[in-house]
């Protein structure tokens, strides 16, 4: 088991290394000059532009040789210093990200987990009951085949514009000041419903279909037949099938994380929801290199950590992974 | 005696198992034997004794951990090139014939590929294919227009033999070739194989766990037990005068039609292993792999 | 007392497919007496597993068409699944053809045993597991297998374990489908002997032993039933089948078996030319007629009826008298 984990860990570390390197390189080799961008903001100050330019260049370390910049980047990475945003100057990138992160967690985590749980339950239901299956499958297919942004736009159109039940912009009303009080929380939830639903529903379809197919496969497997021949009730066989069918769904969760994150971005953009996705869009539009860098880095870390966790969970629940790991000498 | 075309020399293959990877399986342990032109050798042993592994080593699907395989005096274990030339002359038929065919291609396309990949000239292509198919008892008109899934396991296995025939191979590794077939058809396939060996000088390594079939068809018999070659020699000598306890036990457990088993003998796998260990321990005089009579060798100790 | 435990009368079991019926069991008659081991032989696809499975677990696409299968005097073909469930495991049990994957990979063997016996209102307490351990001893399995997952066991161990589990409730009739086919000769002998042992110790009442390997059947079966393409060719005690077969198919089958004193270079055995017919929508007539050298006109027109030619020796062939007297097969 140790070897398996070690191997996985090394793979993740290598991926991380390349991702960080790429992340460092992209803004530096991209056309355009962040300092000039920044200077454009200080247009009023004639003459002083040269002074300002050198100050900024120094503070961003852009006058150093590339290799020093590279190592400096790693160093600042571990100290959590991701630089200063240009578009929201002088806010720190790490500060902006940690603020956005709260919204992401509150939106994404419930959407992913709930859709996974509910989707699996509904899918399992569908897999063992022909009638339920015939009614539900078309829904699941429509849900899973619609792109996140498209579904989000639909929700905005119906509930926001036509029926005007829910707000469609931001995480809370403009007049509210974020704080931990009941008024704000209610307002927050009110804004949260639509983005959550759009993510939840689309993901739900995919999980349900996956689970349904797995359950049907497991129910037709030889061990199910054996149990049936020995007079086991359908309920027990279903329980066994579910236990085995859930395994690929866990892997699915790991594999899907990337697309879920991407889906979350488009959803956030449609709803102007101030999560990382929305911030990233703003950063891109404003050519805010440091913020772009920070966002990407953060996303890479999240996806890697989540995948690693899923790997561990998978190993714990599936004895096959634990024992069948064999190799050639 | 006819010439040796392949020499297996102290072959060894280890696999590591388990996540910890400290434990090793000696799938094949210090195995040596020769393959002569036109000879049928049966390789017999319990499940997991390393038979398929030897086949794969000969077919260069695995690399040995130690030891050598010489084909026409050339060491193929150190020669990493010329795989294609090698496969023109050494081919395998596997346990699962369905896996050996591309399901999307009709049979005629599959035979075309053989010509493209392994045979330089297209001369007499059609004739050669038809002859080979007739030789394995199949109607070319009928068979060539089929997809693999439209044929039975036995038919597919015969096609594999036809393929070896067209390529005019020197050595054919047939792993559990007849396990898919019924008693009534398998004798036909065996007869076919044996007659081809006689006529064309093709050598066959016949991997099986069916001792009666091994006896029927082979000139030489190799008995494997847990990765070791425990007894080898002329088939009639081994069957009539088995020396190693494992061979003796195998021969005793052949279900012989017309003669009933002795109910008192339990044949627990654990007992058999103990008996073999005792045999190794108690053979003080003889050590290692030793000749007991002409063309008959036995493993007396590990 | 030779009481019949199973009495099958003109049973027809067909697979329903898009193109029509596959007549895998087409009007067969046989019985099994208490304490008897009946061997069923025949080439691949002749319907052996269909019969075995059909008796204990009739599942789509296999359909019951007509006839009777009386287990202890009760026709089990008409039973509802619920009623049948009470008979399964206790009265009739099976060791399936694919014993190698009869276990769910994610459950420990002990959990699996507890779960399935609980279905029959048996409390899986320590006392019950003492009995399980006793049985494990009989087949020489270590008690620790109970705490293993199936993937940790070798093929041979799984085979023995299924043997123990299927017979835990001392069934009156045990169906063994190709239990020896995947094993090497020594394990074959062990497993086959064990079935006989279980019968002698009255752990099981009677057994149906299915295999295409006649030489094993000769070792352990009291009577042998030879099937060909969904019909019964011949039933007789094992010595008669092997030494004095009357049906042309049985004769050909026996003579194609390798003998322990024949080598290719001395004498060549012959197989049976041709292949079995496709059972889809097959019509009247003897199904062996395309490969039979005694075939006459009537063979193509009418299906031969099963006829008892002497006590305990049944066969279905129009020309058995001519064939039977022909020594030179
Ligand atoms: N890729 C592999 N990794 C680890 N172990 C392996 C691998 N391939 C084979 N083995 C092990 O090597 C041993 C020999 O296997 P092999 O397949 O050669 O047996 P065999 O004699 O062909 O058995 P069978 O009659 O069941 O086909 C077995 O213990 C098997 O578990
Ligand atoms: N699900 C199915 N649908 C349609 N036909 C089937 C189905 N299962 C089996 N058959 C057909 O029924 C016939 C009998 O099959 P069965 O599995 O009973 O054979 P068998 O005698 O057990 O063969 P084997 O020795 O290969 O196990 C075969 O011709 C097979 O093609
Ligand atoms: S009924 Fe006719 S075809 Fe069938 S076995 Fe008898 S003689 Fe042969
Ligand atoms: Mg093998
Ligand atoms: Mg079968």
Image: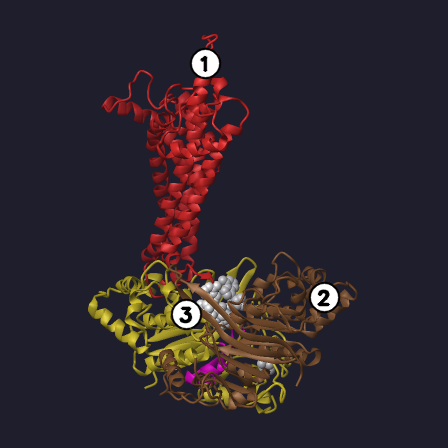
Chain colours: A red, B brown, C yellow
Query: Real-space Cα distance between discs 2 and 1?
Result: 89 Å
Q: Is residue A34 above or below residue A241?
A: above
Is the residue marked 1 within 8 Å of ligand 1, measured from its CB? no
| Same chain assignment for discs 2 and 1 | no
Q: Nearer the viewer, mark 3 or mark 2?
A: 3
In terms of depth relative to the viewer, which is nearer, A162 or C103? C103
Give coordinates of residue C168: x percent, y percent.
29, 71
Crowding around mark 2 (Cα neighbors within 10 Å: few <14, some 14 to 19, many 20+) is few
Label 1: element kind: helix
> Pointer 1: what residue?
A51
Q: Residue at x 45, y 12 (%)?
A: A42
Crowding around mark 1 (Cα neighbors within 10 Å: few <14, some 14 to 19, many 20+) is few
> Pointer 2: what residue?
B141
Q: Would residue B28 appear left or right of A232 to someone viewing this image? A: right
Q: Are marks 3 and 2 in contact (CB under 8 Å)?
A: no
In terms of depth relative to the viewer, which is nearer, B261 or B114? B114
Query: Real-space Cα distance between discs 3 and 2?
Result: 42 Å
Q: Which residues are magenta?
A: C212-236
In the picture, the disc for residue A86 is none
Q: Quarter-wise, where is residue B198 in the image? A: bottom right
Chain hosting mark 1: A
Crowding around mark 3 (Cα neighbors within 10 Å: few <14, some 14 to 19, many 20+) is some
> Pointer 3: what residue?
C155
Q: Residue at x 32, y 32 (%)?
A: A106
Q: Nearer the viewer, mark 2 or mark 1?
A: 1
Give coordinates of residue C328: x percent, y percent.
61, 91
Is residue C221 rendered magenta in the image?
yes
């Amino acid at each position: 088991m140790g070897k398996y984990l070690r191997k996985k860990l090394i793979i993740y570390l290598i991926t991380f290394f390349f991702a960080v390197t790429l992340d460092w390189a992209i803004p530096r080799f991209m056309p355009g000059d962040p300092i000039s961008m920044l200077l454009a903001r200080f247009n009023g100050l004639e003459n002083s532009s040269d002074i300002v330019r050198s100050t900024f260049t120094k503070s961003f370390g852009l006058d150093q040789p590339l290799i020093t910049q590279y190592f400096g980047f790693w160093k600042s990475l571990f100290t959590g210093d991701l630089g200063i945003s240009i578009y929201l100057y002088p806010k720190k990138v790490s500060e902006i990200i940690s603020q956005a992160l709260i919204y992401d967690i509150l939106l994404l985590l419930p959407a992913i987990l709930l859709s996974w749980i509910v989707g699996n339950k509904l899918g399992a239901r569908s897999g063992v009951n022909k009638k339920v299956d015939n009614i539900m499958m078309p829904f699941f297919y429509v849900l899973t085949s619609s792109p996140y942004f498209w579904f989000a736009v639909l929700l905005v159109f119906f509930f926001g514009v036509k029926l005007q039940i829910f707000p469609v912009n931001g995480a809370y009303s403009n007049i509210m000041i974020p704080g931990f009080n009941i008024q704000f929380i209610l307002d927050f939830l009110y804004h949260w419903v639509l983005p959550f639903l759009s993510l939840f529903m689309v993901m739900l379809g995919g999980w349900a279909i996956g689970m349904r197919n797995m359950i049907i496969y497991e129910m037709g497997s030889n061990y199910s037949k054996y149990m049936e021949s020995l007079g086991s009730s359908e309920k027990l066989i279903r329980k066994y099938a579910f236990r085995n069918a859930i395994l690929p769904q866990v892997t699915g969760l790991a594999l899907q994380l990337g697309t879920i994150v991407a889906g979350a971005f488009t959803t956030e953009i449609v709803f102007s929801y101030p999560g990382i996705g929305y911030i990233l869009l703003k950063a891109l539009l404003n050519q805010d290199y440091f913020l772009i860098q920070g966002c990407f880095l953060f996303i890479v870390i999240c996806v890697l950590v989540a995948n690693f966790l899923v790997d561990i969970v998978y190993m714990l629940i599936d004895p096959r992974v634990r024992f069948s790991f064999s190799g050639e000498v | 005696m006819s010439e040796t075309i392949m020499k297996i020399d102290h072959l060894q293959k280890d696999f590591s198992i388990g996540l910890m990877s400290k434990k090793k399986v000696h799938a094949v342990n210090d195995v040596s034997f020769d393959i002569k032109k036109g000879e049928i050798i049966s390789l017999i042993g319990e499940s997991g004794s390393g038979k398929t592994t030897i086949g794969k080593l000969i077919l260069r699907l695995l690399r040995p951990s130690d030891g050598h395989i010489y084909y026409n005096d050339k060491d193929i274990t150190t020669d990493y090139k010329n795989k294609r030339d090698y496969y023109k002359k050494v081919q395998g038929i596997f346990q699962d014939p369905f896996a050996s065919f591309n399901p999307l291609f009709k049979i005629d396309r599959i035979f075309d590929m053989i010509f493209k990949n392994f045979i330089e000239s297209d001369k007499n292509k059609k004739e050669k294919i038809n002859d080979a198919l007739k030789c394995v008892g199949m109607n070319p008109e009928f068979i060539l227009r089929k997809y693999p899934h439209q044929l039975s396991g036995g038919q597919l296995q015969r096609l594999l033999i036809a393929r070896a025939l067209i390529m005019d191979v020197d050595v054919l590794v047939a792993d559990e070739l007849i396990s898919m077939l019924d008693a009534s058809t398998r004798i036909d396939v065996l007869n076919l194989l044996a007659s081809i060996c006689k006529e064309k000088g093709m050598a066959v390594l016949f991997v099986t766990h069916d001792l009666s079939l091994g006896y029927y068809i082979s000139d030489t018999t190799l008995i494997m037990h847990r990765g070791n070659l425990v007894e080898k020699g002329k088939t009639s000598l081994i069957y009539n005068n088995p020396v190693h306890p494992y061979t003796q036990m195998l021969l005793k457990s052949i279900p012989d039609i017309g003669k009933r088993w002795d109910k008192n003998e339990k044949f627990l796998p654990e007992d058999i292993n103990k008996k073999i260990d005792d045999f190794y321990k108690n053979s003080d005089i003889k050590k290692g792999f030793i000749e007991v009579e002409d063309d008959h060798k036995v493993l007396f100790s590990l | 007392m030779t009481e019949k435990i199973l009495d099958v009368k003109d049973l027809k079991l067909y697979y329903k497919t898009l193109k029509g019926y596959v007549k895998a069991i087409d009007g067969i008659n046989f019985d099994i007496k208490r304490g008897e081991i009946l061997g069923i032989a025949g080439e691949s696809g002749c319907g052996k597993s269909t019969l075995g499975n059909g008796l204990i677990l009739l599942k789509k696409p296999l359909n019951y068409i007509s006839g009777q299968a009386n287990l202890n005097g009760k026709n089990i073909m008409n039973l509802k699944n619920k009623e049948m469930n009470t008979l399964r495991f206790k009265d009739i049990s099976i060791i399936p053809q694919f014993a190698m994957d009869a276990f769910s990979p994610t459950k420990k063997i002990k959990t699996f045993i507890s779960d399935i016996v609980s279905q029959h209102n048996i409390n899986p307490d320590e006392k019950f597991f003492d009995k399980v351990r006793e049985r494990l001893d009989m087949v020489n399995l270590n008690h620790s297998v109970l705490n293993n997952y199936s993937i940790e066991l070798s093929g041979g161990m799984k085979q023995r374990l299924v043997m123990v589990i299927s017979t835990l409730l001392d069934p009156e009739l045990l169906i063994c489908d190709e239990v020896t086919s995947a094993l090497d000769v020594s394990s074959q002998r062990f497993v086959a002997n064990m079935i006989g042992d279980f019968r002698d110790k009255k752990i099981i009442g009677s057994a149906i032993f299915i295999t295409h390997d006649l030489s094993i059947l000769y070792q352990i079966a009291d009577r042998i039933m030879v099937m060909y393409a969904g019909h019964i060719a011949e039933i007789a005690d094992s010595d008669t089948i092997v030494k004095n077969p009357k049906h042309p198919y049985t004769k050909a089958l026996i003579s194609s078996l390798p003998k322990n004193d024949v080598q290719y270079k001395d004498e060549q055995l012959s197989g049976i030319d041709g292949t079995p017919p496709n059972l889809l929508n097959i019509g009247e007539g003897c199904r062996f007629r395309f490969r039979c050298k005694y075939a006459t006109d009537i063979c193509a027109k009418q299906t031969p009826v099963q006829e008892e030619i002497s006590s305990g020796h049944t066969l279905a062939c129009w020309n058995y008298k001519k064939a039977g007297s022909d020594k030179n097969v």
